[in-house]
Image (spheres, rainbow, N blue to C red):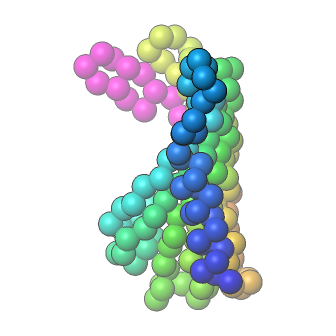
Amino acid sequence: MKTSLKAGLFGVLALASFAPAAYADGDAAPAWGPITATVSLTSDYRFRGISQSDRGAAIQGSIDYTHPSGFFAGVWASNIDFTPFADNDASAEIDLYAGYTHAFTDTTSGTFKVVYYWYPDANDAPDTPDYLEVIGSVSHDFGIASVS
């Protein structure tokens, strides 16, 4: 079951990253609009300096929606391996997020977002690894460098 969950999830993410191949005669290729997708392969998935894949390779992907008003939402996923450091058998991490970015000036912006880190196949232990995080940031572009 865990293998089929990962295979299905990453299959959908991979298919979502390809542009349509054919258009009607005379039609221009449509703009992707506010929806984008990514797929990546990394030699080690690290989060805040700690390996989440037991120093092994990870395939990751995302689907994101961004509205011109500044609202955004998306889903990001990766395979993980917490053994031998955790008492759960989680093999996938799915991050669900939404937020809002506001440009105060041409060089200064602020972002507020909420991220839910979900481990769908983790054991139902009392110390489930799922958690919610609220993040706020402000960034400014000085021209030669940007600071957040």
Is 14 colored magenta in this rendering?
no
Q: Based on the displayed image, in which of its 4 quarters is residue 142 positioned?
A: top left
The number of discs equals 0
Q: Based on the displayed image, in which of its 4 quarters is residue 37 positioned?
A: top right
Image quarter where the N terminus lies is: bottom right
Residue 31 visible in rendering: no
Side of 83 where 43 appears, left or right: left
Does residue 137 lie above or below 38 as drawn? above
Residue pictured at 30% horizontal, 16% vertical:
143
Side of 25 where 40 appears, left or right: left
- Nearer to us in this view, 19 or 93: 19
- Nearer to us in this view, 127 or 96: 96
Does residue 60 lie above or below 129 as drawn? above
Question: Residue 114: image x %, image y %?
Answer: 67, 46
Question: Residue 73: image x %, image y %?
Answer: 67, 40
* Magenta part of the chain: 135-148
Question: Residue 41: image x %, image y %?
Answer: 39, 60
Residue pictured at 53% horizontal, 47% vertical:
17
Side of 24 where 39 appears, left or right: left
Question: Residue 86: image x %, image y %?
Answer: 54, 84
Residue 62 visible in rendering: yes
Residue pictured at 46% horizontal, 27% vertical:
139
- Residue lying at the far front in this picture: please name it: 25
Q: Based on the displayed image, in which of its 4 quarters is residue 124 positioned?
A: bottom right
- Residue lying at the far left in this picture: please name it: 144
Residue pictured at 60% horizontal, 80% vertical:
3
- Nearer to us in this view, 136 or 52: 52
